[in-house]
Amino acid sequence: MGNAGGQGTASAPVVAVLDQGIGFNASVFAAAMDAPIGSHGATVARVLLNTATTPPAGGVRPLDIALSSAQLGASFADLVHGNLDVDVFAASWGVSRMFGDDFAGPDYAGASAALDRALTEGRDGKGSVFVFAAGNRGDDGDNVNHHNFQNDPGTIAVGAVDALGAAADFSTPGAAVLLSARGVDVPVDPGNPGAGTVTGTSFAAPQVAAAVSDMLAEAPELGYRDVQTILAATAQPTGGSANAADTFNGGGLTFDPNIGFGVLDHAAAVRLADAWQGSATAGTLQHGRAAITGSAAIPDGGGGPLVIQLGLDAPLSVEHVSLGIDLEHDWIGDLTIDLVSPEGTRSRLLDRPGQAPGSASGSSDDDIDFTLTSAQFRGETAAGVWTIEVTDHGAGFDGTLTGISLDVEGAAASADDTYVFTDAFATLGGQPGRATVVDDDGGRDALQAAALSGDAHIDLTDGAVSWLAGRAVTTWGLDDAYGGAGHDMIVGTETANLIYGGLGNDTLHGGGGADTFDVSDNDGHDVVQDFDGHAGDRLAGRDDGGGFEVMQGEDGVILQMADGSSVELQGVSAFDADWFLA
């Protein structure tokens, strides 16, 4: 059953834009036109309001933040502490100085504490969602891993692409970019061409914030970590390489440091959010940690990498990895740091800071004491040996690594697996290994196709072929199925299944066992071919419970819902209201 408890129950979240000079005399921007053109923050608010399907509660709350380096940390902390009722914070700014916003330092420790409090206490413990623009200094050699506001595991860093989905040259890249959205020639008001266009990650981020607002409107029980997973899973990849996860489109998530896991798919994210199960919060977040002390020399240019291995015995499904580094070097622009997971995925956490494209050298600054992060390993297994490679690509400057710590965070390992499929399977499904899903570790396992925009044919029978996004996939060991926006056919097994049709006119067949047919998001006419309430079958998913009219159809009873949708139970002559689980 969807977190929202059914279609039509959307409630408006509270959304705030943190920016300089945004507030003027307004307590809220109730509509896009209330946010005047000319102010950076007001334009961010206009883009957000024009993108959201469900208007945020009371519009967008403008929060004036002091962006000077001397005041930013304290200003951010004060605004977050004072607005813990906010569901989504949108921030389209950053610190220009590399490694300037250090959450471990005195200037930003308060900001870090405020962020942690909002992630822990916000939204009644489900966590406020923070969406940050990745930055516009990619062509200057900047990286989101030079900035703790953008690379913190509790924030969502958003890059920019053009109208064709190609990464914008200016967009700041890095292993902590979660996804991207259009940031080149973005219409300020799609319905008013005279309003003009804007360019920058500043205007990609509010599109993601709007999508998050719509996700929470439909599924208010989502934890902030669920939001990140759903955005990553539904983003449309345009390049990069797959990690070693096995539950996304028949394999791993595709990642490119220039765009993250892909380009925002707003509608797919909302559909998947509405059908999502569970609530991943700060309270359920697990950690696996390892560290070393002592010094190790970094071989000078051409001498090969300094290799360090850290073992973890942590039964986790990875969401983020943080690497705390403390090193001495007189020319940090010569350095790269790669992190390799136990399953072989390589992520570049430091990439010659300050080296602009086409330049032979990077920053001449010295020493780094900072926390680097990566989102690239999402869905992999944490247990095993993690390998860190520190490489000096220039000659003439010695370096020493004086400390390193690894923190892998994510969900506790579980035999209950969810295999997510999206429209990207139309392309990814042709890759080796993705056309077969085998779950043989027990647990309650689901084929989750709510993100699909087209028709799906899902058969949970072991060894049966399902058709998703126009491609075949053969599955074993699955129990439950979730359809998407199309007219789906879903077939269960001889044991108890949960079958969710989603949008469209769906045909559902449970097979044997006491099956639950979730019609929470039915917006058309669903047909259940073999419903048997006396044998334990149930309908589920709507808050209105008995808010339907039972009619006699040609092939069985029809439950006519107040919103105009209907469910036909073929072969059923009479319906007991107790068979409907509200």
Image (tube, rainbow, N blue to C red):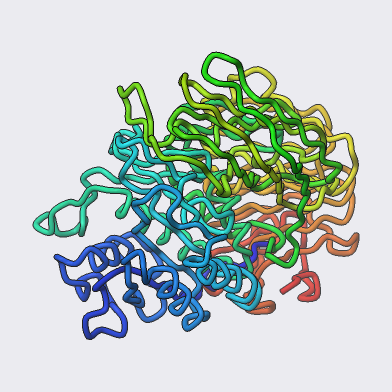
Query: Farthest residue toward the top?
Result: 302
Picture quarter with the C terminus:
bottom right
Residue positioned 12% across, 59% down in the render: 195
Please determine whether, in this image, residue 264 is positioned above or below residue 131: above
Answer with left or right where residue 349 lies relative to residue 211: right
Using the rendered view, name the quadrant where residue 519 is placed. bottom right
> In the drawing, does residue 156 fall left or right of residue 202?
right
Residue 61: x percent and y percent?
36, 77
Nearer to me, 14 or 412: 412
Q: How far across and down, in percent of the image, does residue 207 sit? A: 37, 55
Of residue 79 and residue 366, the one placed in the foreground of this image is 366
Location of residue 30 with respect to 137 vertically, above or below: below
Front residue of 560 and 226: 226
Residue at image position (47%, 67%) is: 107
Q: Residue furthest left?
A: 194
In the foreground, 301 or 449: 301
> Is residue 382 visible from the viewing direction of this image?
yes
Looking at the image, which residue is at 54% across and 42% down? 452
Answer left or right for 578 relative to 558. Answer: right
Quadrant of residue 26 within the rendered picture: bottom left
Number of numbered discs overlaid on the protein picture: 0
* Residue 487 seen in the figure: no
- Residue at 38% across / 62% down in the picture? 91
Q: Quadrant of the N terminus?
A: bottom right
Residue 45 picture quarter: bottom left
